[in-house]
């Protein structure tokens, strides 16, 4: 991920996509699966540990938020934003706000699942490969994986609650992905 062709070298600046948890988790997943399937569960080249260290450090800094937007959130409350607008602009802004549609709820939940599943799977596979060598330790990894699982299940619930009559949550492709991944052995 540090090569020049990947976002320009080792220096990581604000907004660098390499800081996104799911971006770090993807090569972690690949390295862990390779170790488990073809290297008897041994991290011979150290890539599982290297990516696990990056992911754990990133999660400590940013949590599961997108670090490119985390600093922008909450920096100026809504009253600060509205105070810069005229009364007419405020009224127009309020009129434009509407409850998201069922489709938007399902789409947002599916997007969340796709990102979180990669992080959850990367952590759980790395834990299987690294055991006691897992960065952050067993307890912290367990807590993070549990929180991820809860967030994913909450997103599945959101999808279920927003499907139209006659649709099954089991038919939703993102939910199928989660079911397949969580039941892997």
Image: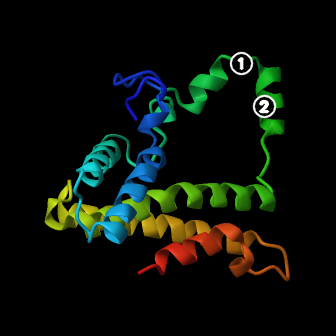
**Callout 1: 10 Å neighbours few (<14), some, many (20+)?**
few
Q: Are marks 2 and 1 in contact (CB under 8 Å)?
A: yes
Q: Position of residue 37 (x, y in %)?
A: 36, 70
Q: Position of residue 30 (x, y in %)?
A: 42, 57
Dot label at residue 93: 2
For residue 66, above or below residue 120? above
19 relative to 143 in the view: left or right = right
Residue highlighted by disc 1: 85
Q: Residue at x 20, y 54 (%)?
A: 135
SS type, badge 1: loop
Give the residue displayed 39% in from the left and 22% down from the top.
9
Q: Is residue 73 above or below residue 122?
A: above
**Relative vertical location of residue 34 with respect to residue 63 in this rendering, above or below:** below
Residue 95 in sight from this viewpoint = yes
Nearest the camera: 113 or 69? 113
Q: Quadrant of residue 130?
A: bottom left
- Asked if residue 144 lies left or right of residue 91, the reply is left
Q: Residue at x 49, y 40 (%)?
A: 66
Location of the N terminus by quadrant is top left
- What distance separates the C-alpha of mark 2 from that of mark 1? 9 Å
Q: Is residue 185 above or below residue 42?
A: below
Image point (65%, 60%), residue name: 110
Location of residue 116 in the rendering, given as x and y in whole percent from the top left corner: 50, 58
Q: Which type of secondary structure does the marked residue at label 2 adopt?
A: helix
- In the rendered image, residue 29, in percent from the top left (x then y), is placed at 41, 58
């Amino acid at each position: 991920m540090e090569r020049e062709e990947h976002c320009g070298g080792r220096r990581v600046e604000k907004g660098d996509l390499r800081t996104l948890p799911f971006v770090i988790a993807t090569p972690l997943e690949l390295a862990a699966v390779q170790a488990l399937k073809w290297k008897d569960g041994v991290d011979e080249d150290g890539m599982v540990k290297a990516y696990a260290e990056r992911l754990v450090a990133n999660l400590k800094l940013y949590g599961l938020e997108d670090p490119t937007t985390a600093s922008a959130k909450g920096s100026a409350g809504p009253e600060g934003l509205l105070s810069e607008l005229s009364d007419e602009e405020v009224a127009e802004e309020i009129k434009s706000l509407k409850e998201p549609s069922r489709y938007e709820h399902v789409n947002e939940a599916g997007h969340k699942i796709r990102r979180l599943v990669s992080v959850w799977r990367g952590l759980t596979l790395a834990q299987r490969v690294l055991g006691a060598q897992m960065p952050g330790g067993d307890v912290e990894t367990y807590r993070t994986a549990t929180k991820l699982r809860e967030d994913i299940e909450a997103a599945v619930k959101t999808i279920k609650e927003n499907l139209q009559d006659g649709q099954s949550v089991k038919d939703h492709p993102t939910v199928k992905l989660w079911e397949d991944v969580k039941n892997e052995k």
